[in-house]
Image (cartoon, rainbow, N blue to C red):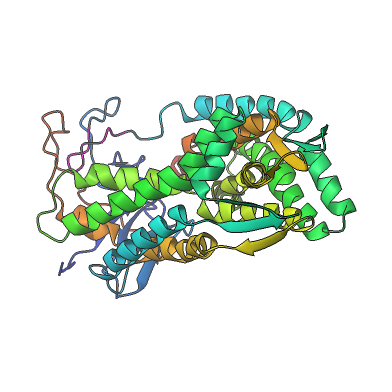
Amino acid sequence: MSTATLTAAQAGLVACESCGLLSRPADAAMPGYCRRCGEALEFRRHRSIETTWALVIAAAICYIPANALPVLTTTTFGSPEDDTILGGVIFLYASGSWPLALIVLIASVMIPLGKLAALAYLLISVQRGSVKSNHERTRLYRTVEFIGRWSMLDVFVATFTVALVQLQPLMSVAPGTGVLFFAAVVVLTMLAAESFDPRRIWDSASAQRARHD
Amino acid sequence: MNPRMLSTPTACPDCDLLQRVPPLPPAGMARCARCGCTLARQPADPRDLPLALAMAAGVVFVIANTTPLMELSVVGRTASTTILGGAYEMWLQGEQLTGVLVGFCAVLAPAGYLLFMLTLLIAARRSPVPWWIGEMLRWAHHLRLWSMLEVMLLGILVALIKIAELATVDAGIGMFAVGALLLLFPAIVVNFDTRDIWERVEWADSDTATPEPPATRATQSMP
């Protein structure tokens, strides 16, 4: 009997997500509440796959206007000029600050796309019951969690550019609607990463091992 | 001090593997045997250092929000802003939701986190730890996820470099204060001993609690 790798769920134990206390519920269908901290107990995050998909799809939908609509409108002596995220990257590159262009490109274009792709991959792999690459998938999940906040970069860039450059009529900057959609993408993907239960990555492998014992 | 004589049975939050966490030496850390997730950390000075850091962070935070981040001047006109000023300007310019979000991620969330941590750290100095500490810990954890001071600082720098081409920019005290916060916040996290608080907390003792005693013989995992 292999006891080397046993998940809490297989042992009938549930760990409180809040305080970590392990409890053995009398009724597996309704685990009740943690006796130490009062938080509701659940073996796996409730409806984690459905909620994460919903948030990922919503974020993907918001990604289109985030890039299509302008994030900033610069008005120089009365003539306005719209700037989308990609437009801003190109402008930075063309005006010689290619390190900045690279930072904005990575933070505002590649990271959100990467997060959406990574979450979709994780969801699909869990739904298909994949037992391979558990370590890599866990590392991927942790990367998604960690890197998510950095996509807010452009929102802050826009905010402080707007706050500082209010020098009418010489130059003034106004925010565009793209900023809100972009912020929405970041928020939605962060929520999606929070709702995904990484323990599900390991459940298929643990079940398979239990069957072979 | 809390003599942790027995090892604690735990389920890894990332892969749910059952394992025991042995008593840790000061500055020691326990990782999941399977996926490497940090299970427990034993800070070197869990009682006083996080509180000192949190108090310092509180003072620095007030400075960061009340002093201007930078001063900008072009053709004789000057401009400066604080963090909240930036969020407010977004509101005035019609992007209210974005302004609120920026205000939340840059000011409200870190402020809330510091407030909760200070309350926690002060209240946890007595045993047993009051029951509402658990709620505070949860809030503190969530607020930390949404505190984006480091992203904001990089964003300000990018904006400044863009603006610096047409104006003279001087970094203000606020900017350095934010930089200090970037160091203080992770320092608080690393030096904070969550397990100790949970072990000393008053149990919720709710009637709907599961009738069986918790955490019996967890299966040992091979290291």
> Residue, x 26% and y 45% (percent of image)?
B136
> Residue, x 66% and y 36% (percent of image)?
A116
Nearer to me, A196 or B146? B146
Q: Position of residue B183 (x, y in %)?
A: 47, 66
Q: Position of residue B50 (x, y in %)?
A: 30, 65
In the rendered view, would you say A82 is above or below B152?
above
Quarter-of-image position of residue A118: top right
In the rendered view, would you say A120 is above or below B81?
above
**Is residue A40 one of those drawn in magenta?**
yes
Nearer to me, B166 or A186? B166
Q: Residue furthest front?
A: B76
> Residue, x 29% and y 42% (percent of image)?
A16
Nearer to me, B134 or A208? B134
Q: Position of residue B197 (x, y in %)?
A: 21, 56
Left or right, A4 with reference to B86: left
**Is residue A130 one of those drawn in magenta?**
no
Q: Quadrant of the N terminus of chain B?
A: bottom left
Left or right, A133 with reference to A24: right
In the rendered view, would you say B66 is above or below B209?
below
Residue B101 visible in the displayed image: yes
Q: Position of residue B111 (x, y in %)?
A: 38, 49
Which stretch is magenta? A33-41
Q: Quadrant of the C terminus of chain B?
A: bottom left
In the rendered view, would you say B6 is above or below A15?
below
